[in-house]
Image (cartoon, rainbow, N blue to C red):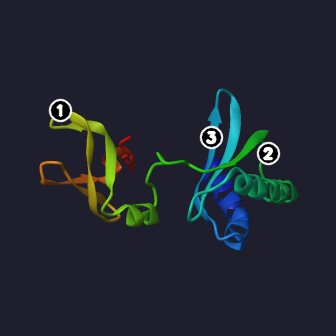
């Protein structure tokens, strides 16, 4: 319960800063790692996020969090870009990735495979459809996907 509440309230606080700078809030997460709580805001913009962008938002966001003081636990605030290998989570992530190669990792194997790569051709609230290398279409339930992200070959 606290996780969703913290993430939601933090998102409400940061959104005016994000909009003012023409950035996009990609994700907000409240997680505990190795005994330490983290509040993470992942941001993006056309052309990519710089360290200076992250610092600017982090300073202003930290001040707002201090004023509101709704998080009772000690935590570390991080504002960063998800980078090239960020997962696709929201509909806007899927929309901008139509026609691009994606990597999908499933929770459970399908035809003895848990990982697939293909061109993202469609999505809706329940499914994702990719075109495999052999030209066949594959539709996967979103709830069955452990991770989906853009595929990059170097």
Q: CA distance from mark 2 to mark 3?
A: 14 Å
Where is residue 110, by image quadrant?
Answer: top left
Mark 2 is surrounded, within 10 Å at the Cα level, by few (under 14), some (14 to 19) or many (20 or more) other residues, namely: few
Where is residue 117, by image quadrant?
Answer: top left
Q: Which residue is mark 1?
A: 112
> SS for tag 2?
loop
- How far across and down, in percent of the image, does residue 131 sit? 20, 55
Which residue sits furthest front? 154
- How far across and down, in percent of the image, does residue 78 sit? 70, 45
> SS for tag 1?
loop
Q: CA distance from mark 3 to mark 1?
A: 32 Å
Q: Tell me: residue 132, above or below residue 154.
A: below
Q: Nearer the viewer, residue 45 or 26?
A: 45
Q: Earlier in the sequence, mark 3 or mark 1?
A: 3
Mark 3 is surrounded, within 10 Å at the Cα level, by few (under 14), some (14 to 19) or many (20 or more) other residues, namely: some
Q: Earlier in the sequence, mark 2 or mark 3?
A: 3
Q: Which residue is mark 3?
A: 31
Which residue sits furthest top? 34
- How far across and down, in percent of the image, does residue 47 sit? 56, 62
> Of discs 1 and 2, which sits in the foreground?
1
Mark 1 is surrounded, within 10 Å at the Cα level, by few (under 14), some (14 to 19) or many (20 or more) other residues, namely: few
Residue 68 horizontal side relative to residue 118, left or right = right
Q: What residue do we see at 80% from left, 55% from top?
A: 65
Residue 51 horizontal side relative to residue 130, left or right = right
Where is residue 26, by image quadrant?
Answer: bottom right
* Residue contact between numbered discs 2 and 3, judged by CB atoms under 8 Å: no
Which disc, if any, is residue 72? 2
- How far across and down, in percent of the image, does residue 59 sit? 81, 54
> SS for tag 3?
strand
Residue 33 horizontal side relative to residue 139, left or right = right
Query: Which image quarter is the C terminus in?
Result: top left
Q: Earlier in the sequence, mark 1 or mark 2?
A: 2
């Amino acid at each position: 319960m606290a996780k969703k509440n913290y993430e939601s309230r933090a998102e409400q606080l940061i959104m005016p800063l994000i909009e003012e700078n023409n950035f996009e809030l990609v994700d907000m997460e409240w997680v505990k790692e190795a005994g330490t709580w983290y509040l993470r805001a992942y941001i993006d913009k056309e052309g990519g996020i710089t360290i200076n962008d992250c610092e600017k938002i982090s300073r202003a966001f930290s001040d707002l969090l201090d004023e509101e003081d709704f998080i009772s636990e000690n935590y570390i605030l991080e504002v960063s870009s998800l980078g090239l290998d960020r997962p696709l989570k929201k509909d806007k992530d899927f929309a901008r990735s139509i026609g691009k190669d994606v990597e999908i990792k499933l929770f459970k194997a399908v035809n003895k495979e848990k990982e697939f790569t293909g061109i993202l051709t469609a999505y809706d609230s329940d499914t994702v459809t990719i075109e495999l290398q052999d030209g066949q279409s594959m539709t996967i339930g979103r709830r069955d996907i452990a991770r989906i992200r853009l595929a990059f070959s170097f």
